[in-house]
């Protein structure tokens, strides 16, 4: 079980990361909109911007997913379930939370989930 100090630490870290992601999403979205408004002179320009846009879109998607995970973790702090594995309901180790502070599963359950995903996919 995490102490109040540890919960406060993770809450602050999650809020900082959330703010960085939201700022990055806003900046990247603005840049993508500006690029789409450009008049492209040739196919090379168009290909270059299209490739960059695809990468930026993938990054935006990944950051939106991370933002959702952070919001879920903040809700768990509010409701007293932060740091508890969603699968086995055991405590998630503090070292794992320090590395991935929005972790939903302990290491053992995460490995089980990854193995199942590899079988299916």
Image: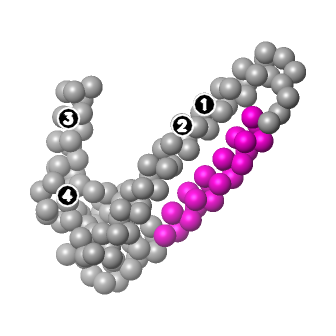
Q: Is residue 45 left or right of residue 11?
A: right
Q: Is residue 7 left or right of residue 87?
A: right
Report if residue 118 is visible in the image: yes
Image point (68%, 26%), residue name: 50
Q: Earlier in the sequence, mark 3 or mark 2?
A: 2
Read off the residue under disc 4.
86
Q: Position of residue 102 (x, y in %)?
A: 36, 60
Image point (87%, 21%), residue name: 41
Q: Residue 28 lies in magenta, yes or no?
A: yes
- Mark 3 crowd level (few <14, some 14–19, many ≥20, 10 Å Cα): few
Q: Position of residue 69 (x, y in %)?
A: 39, 56
Task: Give the Cα distance between marks 3 and 2.
Answer: 24 Å
Read off the residue under disc 2.
58
Task: Give the Cα distance between marks 1 and 2.
Answer: 6 Å
* Camera-side mark, 4 or 3: 4
Q: Quadrant of residue 48?
A: top right
Q: Position of residue 19 (x, y in %)?
A: 56, 65
């Amino acid at each position: 079980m995490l102490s109040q100090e540890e919960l406060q630490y993770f809450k602050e870290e999650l809020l900082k990361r959330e703010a960085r992601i939201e700022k990055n999403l806003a900046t990247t979205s603005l840049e993508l909109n500006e690029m789409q408004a450009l008049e492209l002179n040739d196919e090379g320009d168009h290909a270059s911007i299209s490739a960059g846009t695809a990468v930026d879109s993938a990054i935006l998607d990944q950051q939106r997913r991370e933002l959702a995970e952070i919001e879920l973790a903040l809700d768990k702090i509010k409701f007293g379930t932060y740091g508890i594995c969603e699968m086995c309901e055991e405590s998630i180790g503090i070292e794992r939370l320090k590395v991935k502070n929005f972790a939903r599963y302990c290491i053992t359950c995460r490995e089980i989930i990854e193995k199942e995903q590899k079988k299916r996919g």
